[in-house]
Image (cartoon, helix red, strand yellow):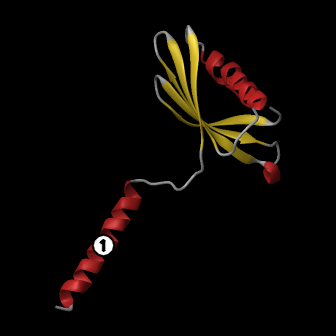
Amino acid sequence: MDDIHFERHFRTPHSEGYYIMQGNNLQSNNRLGTVDIHFTTTAVHGTLILERELEESDLTKLIEQIDEDLVLSADMPRDDFLVSVYVGKDVGFYSDEYFAEENNESLDFDDDDDSSL
């Protein structure tokens, strides 16, 4: 695939996660999806989540590029690269801060309800 590059968003001793971006300039720089790569002693497992469907030929080219650019460059021994592919959409980002704010808002509603009794 043309104009694909990867932006790492996490790394652990045995895993890495990347945003898959398409486009070379800021105006056309769109996220195509994400890939998480997990290194075991015998194989590398990938979870590829695409934000839009790709033709089979483009999908195989993308997996080959992930293998060449990310897996092989990690210099970890492997017998196989196993990839699970999903197509979905981003519905939100949640963190402890989000849930803390949600809990505080629900506590505020409870306080209001108690004061009206």
Side of 42 where 55 appears, left or right: right
Quarter holding residue 67: top right
Give the quarter of the figure containing the N terminus.
top right
Which residue is farthest bottom? 116
Which residue is farthest front? 56
Q: Secondary structure at mark 1?
A: helix
Q: Amino acid at mark 1?
A: Ser
x and y percent of residue 68 in the render? Answer: 70, 19
Residue at 29% x, 79% y: name it: 109
Up-down: is 90 above or below 81? Answer: below
Say few, some or many: other residues with alpha carbon within 10 Å of mark 1 (under 14 / 14 to 19 / 20 or more).
few
| Residue hosting label 1 | 106
x and y percent of residue 24 in the render? Answer: 82, 42
Up-down: is 8 above or below 31? Answer: above
Residue at 71% x, 21% y: name it: 64
Which residue is farthest left? 117
Side of 4 where 36 appears, left or right: left
Residue at 47% x, 28% y: name it: 12
